[in-house]
Image: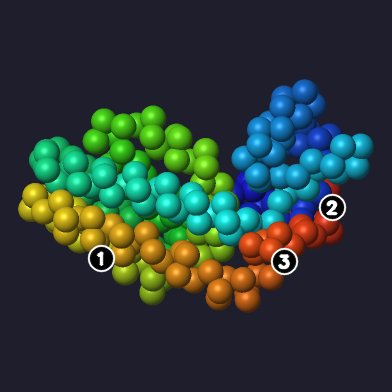
């Protein structure tokens, strides 16, 4: 819910409300919030409040570096091996993305986009790296959510995915890497525009304090 921005930066999270929402006691809620704090997604002020943190651009850039480094090696390995079943799975994923794009279901398209990349991790034999990467990508994922593609951008994403898969199928590792590098550049390229559109959501490198203003923990 934090990554999806249902809980926007600055939202005050109530343990009682969250426990009621998820049908659990406050103990697992407290433990979950501590883990989220370790990932930089919430800030805990003892005896005061737990607040959804602002999006940290420094952390987002580092997560992007990690993801790009991993996936450049992954597409290279896939292109060198080029298994037909992997290409088929990736093309099926693109077809699903295209269906969601045509229907205008941006949330499902975003989920299918993420699934496309996960297929590559699994096909390369490094599924644990997917979970490692995502433990560090909360800030980047929130930025991507702010930059959720519109109908026009979907065509670009589909073209990028298709180009990556075509390069893998053609056993061209350097070309696959070039297309992937272009594909992953979008969100960070739009940082200044996102900062202008959402000034209360993003923390720049100067470490501006997170706003505290939205109460209750169940709505942004």
Residue 93 visible here:
no
Position in image of residue 135 (x %, y %): 52, 38
The part of the image, by quadrant, that contains residue 84 is: top left
Would you place residue 59 above or below residue 132 in this image? below
Q: CA distance from mark 3 to mark 1?
A: 33 Å
- Local packing at callout 3 (Cα closer than 10 Å; few below 14, some 14-19, many 20+) is some
Residue at numbered disc 2? 215
How far from the left and from the top, in percent, is residue 122? 29, 34
Instruction: Give the mark count.
Output: 3
Q: Earlier in the sequence, mark 3 or mark 1?
A: 1
**Extreme-left residue of the structure:** 170
**Distance of label 2 from label 1 (alpha carbons):** 42 Å
- Position of residue 218 in the picture relative to residue 121 (left or right): right
Q: Nearer the viewer, mark 2 or mark 3?
A: 3
Residue of label 3: 200
Residue 138 in view here? yes
Residue at 39% in and 71% down: 153
Q: Which residue is mark 1?
A: 159
Q: Earlier in the sequence, mark 2 or mark 1?
A: 1
Quarter that holds the C terminus: bottom right
Please, what secondary structure does the residue beneath circle 3 have? loop
Color style of the picture: rainbow
In the depicted structure, whether residue 180 falls above or below residue 129: below
x and y percentages locating residue 12 in the rendered image: 81, 49
């Amino acid at each position: 819910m934090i990554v999806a921005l249902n809980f926007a930066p600055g939202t005050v999270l109530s343990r009682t409300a969250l426990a009621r929402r998820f049908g659990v006691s406050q103990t697992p809620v407290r433990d979950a919030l501590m883990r989220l704090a370790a990932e930089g997604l919430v800030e805990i002020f003892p005896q005061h409040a737990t607040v959804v943190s602002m999006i940290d651009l420094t952390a987002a850039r580092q997560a992007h570096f990690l993801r790009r480094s991993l996936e450049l090696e992954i597409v290279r390995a896939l292109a060198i091996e080029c298994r037909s079943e992997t290409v088929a799975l990736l093309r099926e994923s693109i077809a699903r993305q295209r269906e969601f794009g045509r229907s205008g279901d941006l949330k499902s398209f975003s989920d299918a986009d993420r699934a496309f990349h996960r297929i590559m991790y699994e096909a390369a034999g490094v599924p644990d790296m997917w979970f490692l990467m995502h433990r560090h990508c909360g800030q980047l994922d929130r930025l991507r959510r702010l930059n959720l593609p519109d109908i026009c951008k979907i065509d670009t994403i589909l073209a990028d995915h298709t180009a990556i898969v075509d390069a893998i199928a053609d056993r061209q590792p350097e070309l696959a890497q070039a297309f992937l590098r272009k594909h992953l550049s979008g969100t960070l390229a739009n940082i200044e525009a996102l900062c202008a559109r959402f000034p209360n959501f993003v923390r720049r490198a100067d470490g501006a304090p997170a706003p505290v203003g939205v109460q209750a923990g169940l709505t942004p």
